[in-house]
């Protein structure tokens, strides 16, 4: 097998691992990876704004806003206008949101981060530079991405599309 074939196979394995985790997360908790991250961010600081959540988890404000809309519709979170500053809308978990979060597994990237940080500094740098080079070779440098390990849309995956 050529080296480029081995590399592409390794990339497909990584994508597949993320995909399997995403499906498993949705199956067992009914949450997507971004939903899980947002719920965890809200529980860490009740009364946080959507823009603060977006900044803290490095997702776009538009993405966070859409996810919050869906979670509010599912009654996992609720919004309240700040009593001190009427321009600020603060986010809080509902009891249903707290119950769901307490049963949810650890996000995939937390396990990855623990293992990555256990590596020697030189190996961390090597992996980082290699992945940055791969992204450049795939013309993916300018793509909008966040450090959330997720593949595709759960609704599409669940409906077999």
Image (cartoon, rainbow, N blue to C red):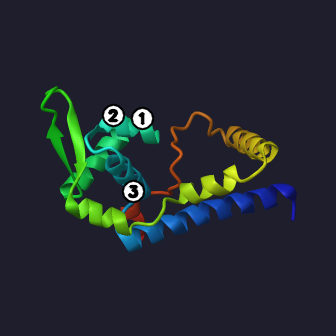
Quarter holding the C terminus is bottom left
Note whether 149 is above or below 13 in the view shown. above
Q: Which residue is at 48% across, 64% downward? A: 22
Q: CA distance from mark 1 to mark 2?
A: 6 Å
Q: Residue at x 39, y 56 (%)?
A: 36
Q: Secondary structure at mark 2?
A: helix
Q: Which residue is mark 2?
A: 51
Mark 1 and mark 2 in contact? Answer it, CB < 8 Å.
yes
Q: Quadrant of the N terminus?
A: bottom right
Which comes before the other along the chain, label 2 or label 3? Answer: 3
Residue 8 x, y percent position in the rendering? 74, 57
Residue 22 located left or right of residue 72: right
> Which badge, 1 or 3, comes first in the chain's sequence?
3
Q: Quadrant of residue 83?
A: top left
What mark, if any, has residue 36 been given in the picture? 3
Task: Name which quarter of the figure residue 2 lies in.
Answer: bottom right
Q: CA distance from mark 2 to mark 3?
A: 17 Å
Residue 94 screen position, x and y as percent: 21, 57
Question: Which is more toward the observer, 53 or 11?
Answer: 53
Vertical position of residue 21 compared to residue 140: above or below = below
**Above or below: residue 5 compared with residue 60:** below
Q: Is residue 161 visible?
A: no
Which residue shows up at 60% across the image and 65% down it? 16
Q: Residues within 10 Å of mark 1 (few under 14, many from 20)?
A: few
């Amino acid at each position: 097998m050529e080296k480029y074939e081995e590399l592409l196979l390794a990339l497909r394995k990584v994508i597949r691992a993320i995909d399997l985790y995403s499906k498993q997360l949705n199956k067992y908790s009914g949450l997507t990876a971004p939903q899980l991250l947002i719920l965890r961010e809200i529980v860490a600081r009740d009364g946080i704004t959507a823009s603060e959540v977006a900044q803290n988890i490095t997702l776009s404000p538009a993405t966070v806003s859409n996810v919050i809309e869906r979670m509010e519709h599912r009654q996992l979170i609720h919004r309240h206008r700040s009593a001190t500053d009427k321009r600020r809308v603060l986010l809080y978990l509902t009891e249903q949101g707290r119950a769901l979060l307490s049963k949810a597994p650890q996000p995939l990237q937390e396990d990855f981060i623990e293992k990555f940080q256990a590596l020697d500094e030189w190996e961390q740098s090597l992996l980082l530079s290699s992945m940055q080079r791969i992204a450049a070779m795939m013309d993916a440098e300018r793509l909008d991405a966040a450090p959330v390990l997720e593949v595709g849309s759960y609704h599409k995956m669940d409906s077999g599309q």
